[in-house]
Amino acid sequence: MRVAIFSAEKYERKLLDERNASHGHELVYVDALLAASTASAAVGFPVVSVFVNDIVDRDVLKRLAAGGTQLVATRSTGFNHIDVEAATELGVKVVRVTEYSPNSVAEFAVGLLLALNRKIPRAYNRTREGNFELDGLMGFDLFGRTVAVIGTGRIGTVFARIMAGFGCNVIGFDARRSPEFEKIGGRYVGVDEMAEADVISLHCPLTPETHHIVNARSLAGMKRGTLLINTSRGGLVDTEAAIEALKSGQLGGMALDVYEQEASLFFKDLSSTVIPDDVIQRLVSFPNVILTGHQAFFTREALTTILQTTLASISDFAAGRPLANEIVVGLANT
Ligand code: NAD
């Protein structure tokens, strides 16, 4: 099959080419984000592969369908960037990577929490300059603290298990109960009880319902000084409201691997340019904010599974076999 691959980084291309040896697809890499202005690059390709910041809305899908595309394969679990309803109407099938190492994201979220609480990036920068002072580096013991997990699915449950291992009291918020979460001692609570949390970690998908789930109102209801970790999707947090809460001290610190406006910034080296986004510039100016560029998934195990699953789905499609990872209208976004 001829496959137009958008937004693939160098490390992905190498692995894709290696793994494709046993599939034999014709992989063509497009050096651009997929959008209405770049969709013409996919004309004549029955399969298009995308990543989280590609735009796969109705307009783009119409252009893809007109160019002969029949399958969109996203190299992610989340599919908030794809208008699945429009794809179905246009006869374009959509597949994703249903599951890959939830440990990759959960472990990174724990790493962000430790780095934020114990100020490890600040300490690292200090010692490189010969400054061995401890002033300003005090954190708190996680043992005995309350950690709230919003979304106790695959990643949230692994995160909860690790935090339970630290001796934390783990509470969860999710309409769908996970027996695994309860087995490790997690306790489901209502929104009001979130105020008990010293740490809140977001692991739910971005949907119209969860958009800005962290907003001025919910921030005001948190315990003063709470640490917020977001490795899920940028749109879950109203960034400007979070900035106000950081300024007032209501929010004790924030670690983000995802950012609402990341599409024009992430996965690029912009170190020699003036970044026009004032919100992100304000964010990185806080001593109690850590920002990483959507790397929580980025382990060898996760990437290998992502690419293997994507190629296998394309091979199934080419052979007319059922698509185990197809996204159908009405499927909860994860
Ligand atoms: P999952 O489907 O296993 O779990 C998501 C959970 O969120 C489900 O239990 C669901 O019921 C719950 N949920 C849905 N709406 C909710 C709401 N309003 N409030 C509370 N809970 C709600 O998904 P997963 O594999 O654990 O992935 C979680 C998210 O992590 C993905 O949606 C994706 O956005 C994000 N993610 C980020 C990265 C990264 O590199 N930063 C990588 C993979 C996934």
Image (cartoon, helix red, strand yellow):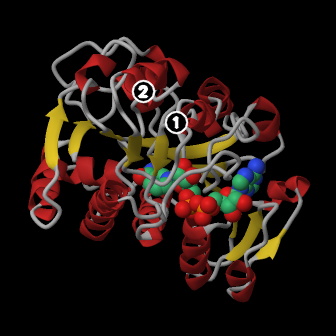
**Within 10 angstroms of label 1, few (less than 14), some, or many (20 or more) residues?**
some
Residue 205 percent coordinates (x, y):
62, 49
Kind of residue indicated by mark 1: Gly
Kind of residue indicated by mark 2: Ala
Residue 98 percent coordinates (x, y):
49, 62
Q: Which mark is residue 129?
A: none
Q: Nearer the viewer, residue 214 or 10?
A: 10
Q: Nearer the viewer, residue 158 or 101?
A: 101
Q: Name the residue furthest bottom.
A: 183
Q: Name the residue furthest front.
A: 320
Q: CA distance from mark 1 to mark 2?
A: 8 Å
* Circles 1, 2 touching at the beta carbon (< 8 Å): yes
Q: Which mark is residue 91?
A: 1
Q: Is residue 317 visible?
A: yes
Q: If the picture is divided into quarters, which one holds ligand 1?
A: bottom right
Q: Nearer the viewer, residue 74 or 110?
A: 74
Does residue 197 appear left or right of residue 195 in this picture?
Answer: left
Q: Quadrant of the C terminus?
A: bottom right
Q: Quadrant of the rendered structure where residue 153 is?
A: bottom right
**Within 10 angstroms of label 2, few (less than 14), some, or many (20 or more) residues?**
many
Residue 117 percent coordinates (x, y):
50, 58
Which residue has dot 2 on it? 65
**Which of the two discs, 1 and 2, labels the residue nearer the N terminus?**
2
Q: Quadrant of the rendered structure where residue 178 is?
A: bottom right
